[in-house]
Image (cartoon, rainbow, N blue to C red):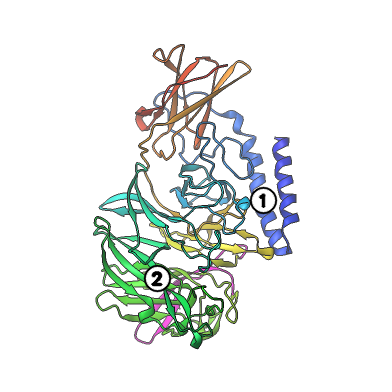
Amino acid sequence: MRNNWIREVGWLLRFIAFSTGERFVATRAARWLTHAFRGFIEGSNRGSRDGGRRRGAAPPRLEALEGRELLSGVWHFASAPGQQPMQANVLALKPGAAIDPIFIAPYDQSSNPGLLVGQTGPLIMSASGSPIWFHSLSNHNKYQAIDFQAQTLHGKPVLTWWQGTISGIQPSNLPPGAALPGGHFVIYNQHYRQIASVQAPKGFSVDEHELLLTPAGNAYIIATKTVRANLTPYGGLPNGMYEDPFVLEINLRTGRVIDSWNMAKHVPLSDSFEPAPTLPNHPWDVYHANSIALSPDGSQMLVSARNTWGIYDISRQSGQILWQVGGKQNQFTMPSSIVTGPYGSAFQYQHDARYTSGGISLFDDGGFGAPPASGPYGPGRALFLNLNFQNHTASLASPPLYHNPPVYPNSQGNVQQLANGDVFVGWGSDTGPGGVLSSDFTEYSPTGSVLADYSLAGQDISYRAFSYPWVGIPFRKPVAAAGVANGQTTVYASWNGSTQTVAWEVLAGPTRTALAPVLTTPRTGFETAIPTTNLGPYYKVLAIGAGDTILKASNVIRVIG
C-alpha cells in the first residue's frame, strides 16, 4: 500500500510540474486527491474477498470495483494482455446514479503518440469504472474510434462507431478534426461481431461525427466533399477550397444513397465564424456539421454546424430550412440571462443538437475559435430550450447544467436524456492553460444535482459519452491464465464483453481430460483473480450466470510451477 501511495504522489508531482496556471492545477489536484483517497479506503478492504460461492448464493453487483492494481492509468490483465484500456477516474458516484454501462472511446487529440494513456478503441465500462468490453485499435494513437454508442437495428441492439484517423493527429492539409480518407463507420451486434460497415460514395469522405440508424434499417451520415471556389469575398484565395458537408441517407443492405441534403446549397458561406485560410491547398472548414437528429414523425431533420453556430431544422420533403436557432441568421430571441456572444447568441461552437418535446437540447461549447470570434464566451454547458414559433422566442426549459469546477471545451461534447429523467453530459475536450487537455462526463438528476462524475486518465478525451442499458453475449470463449508463487496458484479469468457472468468456477486436474471442480468465486470486475492450492497443472474456468447457469467454458491451460 505504501508503494501505491508513492506512485500516486510521484504522479501528482510530475503533473504539477508539467502544468501551468493555478486554476488548472488546483482543479486537477483536487480530483486526484479525491480519487487517491477513495482508492486508499477501497484498497484496505480488498483482503476480505470471498474465496468461494455456494450454489444459490446471491450474485455480486456487476459494477463491483475492479480489484487489480492500476499502473499509470492503464488497466493490465493477465488473461487479456492485449487489452490495455485507459482508466477512468470515478470522482463521484452517489446513490440514485444509473448503473447502466457507460460508452466512451478514448484517444489523444495531439500529434504526440506518447501522450496517449492506454490504447484507443471503443470502451464499455461499469458505473464504478471497471471495463466491461474493450476493442483495442491502436497502441500509438494511429487510429481513433469516434461516436461510440449503442443503437437499435431491425429491433436488435447494436454497437456503432467510426474508426479511422482524424486530421491534426496525423499530418494533413485538411482542417483539424476532419476525417482522413479511409475512415468509416462499423456496426457490431451484441455478440461483438461486425455485421455491417458504412462507407461514403466515391468523391466523399465519411465524417466521424454522426451515424444515425433509422427504424427502417437505413443510416444517416455526414459526408464531406472538397470544393474549389473563389474565396476572396470571404478573405481567402481566388483558387481556394472549402469542405462541403452532405447529409446522406444510405440503405445499409445495398450501400446506395437514398437521399441527400447539401449544406452549402442552403447556408451561405458568409455565415461562417471560421476565417477562410490564406495558405494554398488548405480547405476551409466553413461549416463543420456535427450532428443529425430526426423529428419523431420523421418529416424534419435537425442539423448542427459548429462553425456557423447554427442549428437548422430541415424539411425532409423539400430540403428547405424551416427555421434556424443560433448563428448570424438566428430567428429566435434568446433569454438575456443566457446570452453570451454576438448576434444575441446563447451558444457558440455547439454540438449534439436534439429535438425535445418543447424544442431542442444541445451542448454549448462556448469555446475557442479563431479571431475575430475566438472566445471562449463562457464555460461549457448543457442547454434545454423551449421554442415559441409564433413570436420566435426561446426560453429555458430547465436551468443550464455546468460542470463543477467549470470546464472550457474547445471541441466535442454531448447531452443525453436518460429514460429515468436524468441527464448524462460528455464535456468534450477541455483545454487548460499550457494546452493540456482533459475530458469529463457527468450524470445529473432531474433537479440538476450531480449523481456521478468521471475524468479520463492523462490527456485522453472522448468525443461523446453515453449511458445505456446493454446486454453483451460474446461470441468468443472466456479466457484464463495462471501463475504459481510460493506453492500457490492464482487463476485469472475474464470474458471480454460479458454482462451476464456473475461468478467463475475453476476446474483443475493432472491431465487435460481429468478436470474436477475446485471452487466457485464471485466475479469481480473485468478480470477475477482466484487463488487456489490445487497445483493442477491443468485448469479451465466456467462462466456462471444467474441461477447457476453455465454460460461458456474457457480453453484448458497448463501451468508449469
Query: In the figure, 218 relative to 1: above or below?
Result: below
- Counting labels gives 2
Distance of label 1 from label 2 (alpha carbons): 44 Å
Where residue 409 appears, as percent x and y from the top left, is 57, 66
- Report the amino acid beneath label 1: Trp
Quarter of the rendering containing residue 554? top left
Q: Where is the C terminus found, in terms of image quarters?
A: top right
Q: Nearer the viewer, residue 329 or 371?
A: 371
Where residue 32 appears, as percent x and y from the top left, is 66, 51
Residue 384's label in the rendered image is none
Is 384 colored magenta in this rendering? yes
- Report the amino acid beneath label 2: Lys
Q: Nearer the viewer, residue 92 or 273?
A: 273
Is residue 447 in view from this perspective?
A: no
Q: Where is the N terminus found, in terms of image quarters?
A: top right
Q: Nearer the viewer, mark 1 or mark 2?
A: 2
Where residue 343 appears, as percent x and y from the top left, is 51, 85
Is residue 467 in view from this perspective?
A: yes
Where residue 308 appears, as percent x and y from the top left, is 47, 78
N-term mark: 1 or 2: 1
Is 508 colored magenta in this rendering? no
Magenta region: 378-406
Task: Judge from the rendering whether residue 196 lies leftward or rightward of residue 430; answer left or right.
Answer: left
Task: Judge from the rendering whether residue 313 lies leftward or rightward of residue 381; answer left or right.
Answer: left
Residue for badge 2 = 225
Tag 1's secondary structure?
Answer: helix
Residue in the image at 51% along x and 78% along y = 346
- Asked if marks 1 and 2 touch (Cβ < 8 Å), the reply is no
Tag 2's secondary structure?
Answer: strand
Q: Nearer the viewer, residue 378 or 404?
A: 378
Residue 32's label in the rendered image is 1
